[in-house]
Image (cartoon, helix red, strand yellow):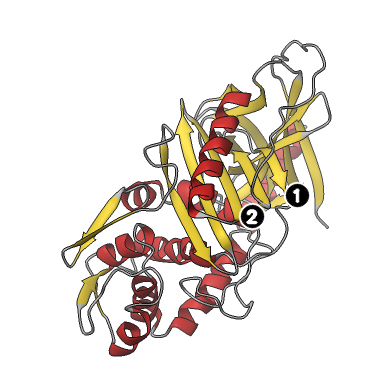
Amino acid sequence: MNRNFAIILAAPLMLCGAAKANPTYDSAAPIAYMIDLSSGAILFDKDSDRQIPPASMAKMMSAYVVMDKIKNGSLPLNKKITVTPEIWQKWNNQGSTMFLASGEQVSVENLMHGMVTLSGNDASVALAVGISGSEEAFVAEMNKTAKRIGLKNSRFGTANGWPDEGRTMVTAQDLAILARRTIEDFPDLYAKFYGKKEFTWGGITQPDRNPLLGKIAGADGLKTGHTEEAGYCFTGTAVQNGRRLILVVAGLDSYNGRITESTNFMNWGFSAWTSKPVFKKGDAIADIPVQLGSETSLKLTAPRNMAVTMPADKASGYKLLIRYKGPVKAPIAMGDQVASLVVKLNDGSEQVSPLYAGEAVAEAGFFGRVWNGLKSLFSA
């Protein structure tokens, strides 16, 4: 039976300043959410667990599935996909479009630009059908992947987020998780496909509708959405001085309102809060015990620069914990999430960041288990 374990880390405690309330923000969006990836801190939460239709933000899930296949080598960027007459007939003038032609052969790379930058409904479905044989089969893979990466309250019914009588529903919390996993799991592909100001296909140049591009320093993704049912929505991110924030806003009533709210919200996140570094990428954090493995312990290292987030106008005391469910048993694959770094502030709040295995630990054979048991006995 798994139990929660915690290791208290030695860390310098910051001096406590005068007691003040955390920074406040009055969001114009019915749903708004912001997290700081450097610490896992939730900076703002307004109805983030309410299920909503995502509109074109669903394409983030499609993009994640495609990137996963590109990274594992099963899908070459130069693979050509044929635009079927059915795809062209349904999507050539239905919402946002890449203006694909019937029978046209287009590379995965260009279709990704068409889906991510242009929000092309035609590009999304062409990728789905070209990769999985049908949109339904691709959507099944979207839902399987969503469950695997921790999207607990989301489900997908289409590859492009077109209204589907309520089958496709997400939460702002899940969209933020999806954004984080995209950025962290595929940094090179994220940089390649997200944050482009425009893309040209068939002689037609169209802009990315990301409201932060050119307005917020360090803005580099992710995805807007709009339908009558969903309103104007956006999942966005920006990085400044090594600190990355992710925001989600949904249900806004105008295009310009989405621009104003997104920029105001992100500016607030960077100005009202500050981050204090606790670990640099690659720093050794702690060793946790491993059972039944070729090694008796697993070293946890910082997967990126890690910090504690607090209001910009006050200092606060904190302590650091490593939290994990144990006993941790082999085999463990490199990249498995095995623990969390927990920053516990004096006010009782916690900031949680996932920690991953930086190395693989194989399952030990019989004699290996005996030897490890003897080593543990004599080192106790």
Estimate the x, y position of residue 227 in percent, counting from the top left.
53, 67
Residue 273 lies in quadrant: top right
Q: Is residue 360 visible?
A: no
Residue 284 in the figure: left or right of residue 73: right
Residue type at mark 1: give it.
Pro
Q: Which dot marks residue 114?
A: none
Estimate the x, y position of residue 214 in percent, counting from the top left.
36, 38
Tally of marks: 2
Residue type at mark 2: give it.
Ala
Label 2: which secondary element: helix
Q: CA distance from mark 2 to mark 1?
A: 33 Å
Residue beneath disc 1: 327
Height in image: 233 above or below 236?
A: below
Q: Are marks 2 and 1 in contact (CB under 8 Å)?
A: no
Which mark is in front, 2 or 1? 2
Residue beneath disc 2: 172
Task: Sort mark 1 into few (<14), some (14-19) or many (20+) by Cα contacts within 10 Å.
Answer: some
Estimate the x, y position of residue 310 in percent, counting from the top left.
68, 24
Q: Report the residue at 75% width, 10% height from top.
A: 15
- Between 168 and 82, the residue placed more toward the observer is 168
Going from the N terminus, do you reach mark 2 or mark 1 first?
A: 2
Height in image: 275 above or below 169?
A: above
Q: Report the residue at 31% width, 64% height from top.
A: 114
Label 1: which secondary element: loop
